[in-house]
Image (cartoon, rainbow, N blue to C red):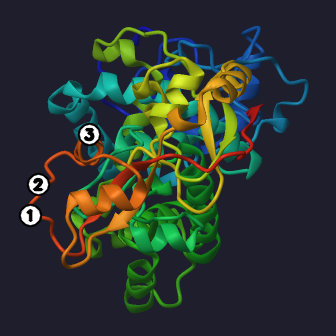
Amino acid sequence: MKSCLPTPLRLSALLISLGLSGCVSGGSPARLWLANPVAQSAENDAETTVSVVSVSSVPLVELASTVYEPVLEPVLEDPTEVRVDEILTSPVLGDEEFTAAVDRWIEYWRGRGSTWLPDYLTGMGIFGESVDSVLAENDLPPSLRYLPFIESGYNPKATSRASAVGLWQFMQGTATGWGMEVTPLIDERRDPVKSTEGAVGFLLELREDLGSWFLALAGYNSGPNRVRRILSRYAPDVQPTDSLFWALRGHFPRETQEFVPKLISAIIVGGSPQDFGIEPVSVDRFAYDVATVPDATSLDVVARAAEVSHEEIERLNPKYLRGMTVPGQASSIRLPEGRGEAFRVNYAKIPAEERVTVVQHRVVSGETLSHIARQYGSRVSEIQAANPGVRARYLRVGAVLIVPVAPRLGTPVAAGAN
């Protein structure tokens, strides 16, 4: 949607990103709408045939394969049925200094950030619908779909310098506290579904504990304990609000001060990418079938049975770090949508000796690759292929190797649709 504003760098551009029709001059109308979106939506309904809602819609956002256009929703008989997005209606969005901070981030997206902005939008096209669904199920502000946009660029494999991982950039301790498994073989922070469920639970807890969404987002970025300390020291008897966070922002790290303005800028950019020189593209949403496979199954075997590339199986299953499922237990595996039944049939046809799986082996003193290969009925060449860079004569004690082995016979394989 083409902006009709003289400059899209003001927060009034948020009207464009939310799909509101008509030109607006200056920032005041935008602030008026943000202060009372229900009333403003009702006024729009009197002039248009649809009630236009973007990230502030109540139902699940139904995205087409092209995901960058503003989302339209049928007119509601009672406009009050539209859920108000608490983040987009915060009074802080009318603050001049906040507006200036958002403007700076929009300049960033126009400049240095434009290099990876198309990839961010593509990632949101793939995973955004599943994120929208979980947010709606838990009655969270739909604008939080842009949190993984600014955290990871919607890249499940993203890893920060601080070792935060995944769409939602969880640190290991926080992730395990929210039920995600993190081991040398599996990292569920990289799982788009599991990590989104954990992020939603974490955000709900932060909002309940800290009292406002801006404070909750500050806690998400810099840790809830830091927020509690700052509130206790500088505002012990003050009601927690978004405005309180903005007033105390100077006591937070610079990244946390900029976190919410960056989020709002992402909403503006993501709602109107054409204004930033990016045309919508078609992407496949994150859709898949699910199969259950024996323990320690190689993803190569899965790809062979599903008749797809190894890269496609890896893309759908980023949580598996070493190209195999977990030893000692059956595991679920994602397959391209529609390939579940073919996988089940084809897997059953693969001779047992060709159903190569892998195990994890920790090197002990005195072992050689030949010794390890004999132990598992494998070959030295196969172990070397599974562990690039390993040297047969110089094994490091304690090193973990992936060893291809023949699977157990008679283990059932089940497949189903997600």
| Sequence-first tag of 3 and 2 | 3
Indicate the secondary structure of the residue bearing disc 2.
loop
Residue located 50% across and 24% down the image: 125
Q: Which residue is labeled 1 in the image?
A: 394
Image position, residue 397 (x, y; %): 19, 75
Which of the pair 266/307 is nearer the observer? 307
Could you give the CA–CA distance between mark 1 and mark 2, rounded to whole angstroms?
5 Å
Q: Is residue 272 visible?
A: yes
Splitting the image into 4 quarters, where does residue 335 fall? Answer: top right
Question: Where's the C terminus, which quadrant?
Answer: top right
Q: Amino acid at mark 3?
A: Trp
Mark closer to the observer (3, 2): 2
- Relative vertical location of residue 38 with respect to residue 402 in this rendering, above or below: above
Q: Which residue is labeled 2 in the image?
A: 391
Q: Are marks 1 and 2 in contact (CB under 8 Å)?
A: yes
Indicate the secondary structure of the residue bearing disc 3.
helix
Q: Amino acid at mark 2?
A: Arg
Q: Which residue is labeled 3 in the image?
A: 105
